[in-house]
């Protein structure tokens, strides 16, 4: 039997009355608020998807509505491959989130990062205010000028490079010692490269890494990869906040959970204002020959260039992170690639065999094969920051697309350095490309930016090149004939992207020949 429409409507009304009679006014209000928020959120998402100029930028369909695809890959440490895959499919300008585009076109990248650019950095969630995160160009220039002396050629040659050479001897000797302790003569170069990179940063900051650094005090690589832990914590917070909160609540039960969800506590001395920060700042090389005001806790190089002890303590975290992980990872990938190519290994070992002590940056800078290998490593595996977001202050044309104000425009170095429109056979490790005069590094600076470019370029470029040149020279001279251990495979060396890159396995084992054999 079919009920009349009037009976159906009457039944619905009666049931609705019963529902409201048993529902509190507060519940009704909460339901209404939730509905309003949901409607507002949906309408906002739809507006971003279809009513802004970004609707014309190619990309996966879901990127118009949500950043979850990107955030999930951030949690997995897979952004490097994810973004490159999108570039291969959609081109050099891709929409990867509702308000974020990725770029790999060299001309567009140069426009975004050029001196005097209108694009600005924006402080990311979970990051302290420091030289890396600061957005105001004037304040950033002040910081660069304050630290300039520590990274000047004069300082590097006079004090830093000799200390770096000693640290390299310690690291390579440790690799050889570890190999002698095992019957198969295997040593993990990842461990010692990472500790070495961090110790150099420690040396620049404090000047005593040979006695108080990580290698001297026998620390683990967990002390080096703090940036990776911070990235993972922030990735979880942005991907699924309830899981992030649950992880923080459970973190006392597990050191692994603590490293993921409460890693900022390890930086407490640097981030929390107080007497401890004044002590940290006063110990640094940076404040030598500066004037200190006890009243406001400010160190002054001049009337225009001054920083507080709080500023310096915050910046130290950046220098430690930028010095340890990127340099260490670049060295690991360099060694791995050379040992995969026996002919290249023989050429490089023959080139460095002719060096005499002391092995310096000046002498190694003249070695064509060594420097070609370094540049190619930086192109494919540069361990620096993998993503460099900038924000458009006004509507801007980039590559034929209008970018609305507030949009994040992100350069991914992996995609830039693998752009087939800019590089021949971009996925191939081909060091010979750098032996051609036409491929001079200065001529390809738009498409080759392992240290970024413009006003925000890495302040320690020359120091990094000293580390890479001298370490690689000493390693391939002292460990000539080394081979990859069976445990070191393409899978173990797959790139893990956690702000800086590293091998997925967090190790790179090699077989070091026995000197007695």
Image: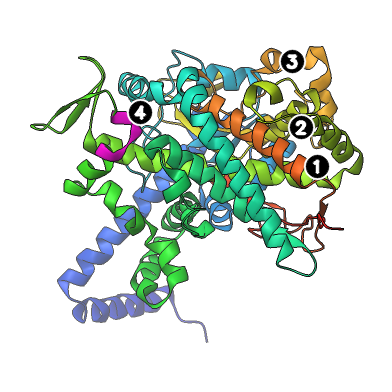
Q: Nearer the viewer, residue 419 or 218?
A: 218
Query: Which residue lies at the image location 27% right of the left edge and 65% below the top edge?
Result: 31
Name the element at disc 2: helix
Q: Label 3 to label 4, Cα distance in Å?
A: 32 Å
Comes first in the chain, label 2 or label 3: 2
Query: Which residue lies at the image location 87% right of the left edge and 58% below the top edge?
Result: 517
Residue 286 falls within the magenta-colored stretch? yes
Q: Label 4 to label 2, Cα distance in Å?
A: 34 Å
The image position of residue 41, as x and y in percent, is: 38, 49
- C-beta proximity under 8 Å, tags 1 and 2: yes
Comes first in the chain, label 3 or label 1: 1
Q: Tell me the mark number nearer the camera, choosing from 2 and 3.
A: 2
Name the element at disc 1: helix
Q: Label 3 to label 1, Cα distance in Å?
A: 21 Å
The image position of residue 374, as x and y in percent, is: 71, 32
The local crowd at label 4, few if under 14, some if 14 to 19, many if 20 or more residues have their Cα within 10 Å, is some
Q: Is residue 58 above or below residue 15?
A: above
Q: Tell me the mark number nearer the camera, choosing from 4 and 2.
A: 2
Tell me the magenta residue range: 282-287
Query: Which residue lies at the image location 7% right of the left edge and 32% below the top edge?
Result: 295
Mark 1, residue position: 338
The image position of residue 74, as x and y in percent, is: 54, 52
């Amino acid at each position: 039997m079919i009920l009349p429409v009037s009976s159906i409507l009457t039944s619905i009304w009666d049931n609705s009355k019963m529902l409201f009679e048993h529902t509190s006014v507060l519940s009704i209000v909460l339901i209404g608020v939730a509905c309003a928020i949901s409607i507002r959120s949906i309408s906002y998402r739809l507006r971003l998807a279809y009513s802004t100029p970004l609707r014309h930028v190619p990309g996966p369909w879901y990127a118009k509505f949500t950043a979850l695809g990107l955030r999930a890959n951030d949690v997995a440490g897979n952004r490097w491959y994810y973004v490159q895959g999108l570039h291969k499919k959609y081109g050099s300008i891709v929409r990867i989130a509702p308000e974020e585009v990725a770029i790999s076109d060299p001309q567009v990248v140069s426009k975004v990062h050029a001196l005097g650019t209108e694009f600005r950095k924006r402080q990311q969630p979970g990051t302290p205010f420091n030289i890396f995160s600061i957005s105001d160009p004037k304040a950033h220039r002040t910081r660069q000028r304050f630290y300039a002396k520590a990274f000047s050629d004069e300082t590097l040659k006079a004090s830093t490079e000799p200390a770096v050479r000693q640290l390299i001897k310690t690291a390579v000797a440790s690799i050889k010692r570890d190999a002698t302790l095992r019957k198969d003569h295997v040593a993990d170069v990842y461990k010692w490269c990472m500790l070495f990179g961090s110790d150099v940063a420690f040396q620049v900051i404090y000047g005593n890494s040979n006695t108080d650094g990580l290698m001297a005090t026998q620390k683990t690589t967990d002390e080096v990869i703090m940036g990776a832990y911070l990235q993972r914590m922030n990735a979880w917070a942005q991907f699924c906040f309830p899981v992030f909160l649950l992880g923080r609540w459970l973190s006392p039960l597990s050191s692994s959970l603590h490293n993921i969800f409460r890693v900022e506590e390890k930086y407490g001395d640097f981030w929390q204002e107080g007497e401890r920060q004044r002590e940290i700042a006063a110990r640094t090389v940076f404040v030598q020959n500066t004037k200190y005001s006890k009243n406001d806790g400010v160190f002054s190089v001049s009337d225009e260039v001054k920083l507080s002890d709080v500023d310096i303590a915050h910046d130290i975290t950046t220098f430690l992170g930028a010095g340890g992980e990127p340099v260490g990872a670049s060295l690991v990938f360099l060694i791995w690639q050379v040992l995969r190519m026996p002919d290249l290994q023989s050429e490089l070992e023959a080139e460095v065999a002719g060096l005499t002590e002391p092995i310096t940056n000046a002498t190694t800078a003249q070695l064509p094969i060594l420097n070609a290998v370094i540049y190619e490593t930086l192109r494919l595996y540069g361990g620096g920051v993998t993503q460099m977001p900038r924000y458009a202050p006004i509507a801007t044309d980039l590559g034929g697309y209008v970018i609305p104000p507030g949009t994040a425009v992100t350069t991914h170095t992996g995609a830039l350095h693998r752009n087939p429109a800019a590089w021949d056979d971009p996925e191939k490790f081909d060091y010979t490309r750098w032996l051609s005069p036409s491929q001079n590094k200065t001529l390809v600076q738009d498409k080759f930016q392992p240290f970024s470019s413009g006003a925000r370029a890495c302040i320690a470029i020359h120091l990094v090149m000293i580390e890479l040149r001298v370490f690689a020279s000493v390693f391939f001279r002292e460990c000539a004939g080394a081979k990859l251990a069976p445990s070191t495979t393409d899978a173990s060396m797959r790139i893990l992207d956690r702000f800086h890159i590293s091998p997925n396995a967090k190790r790179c084992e090699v077989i070091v020949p026995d000197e007695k054999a």
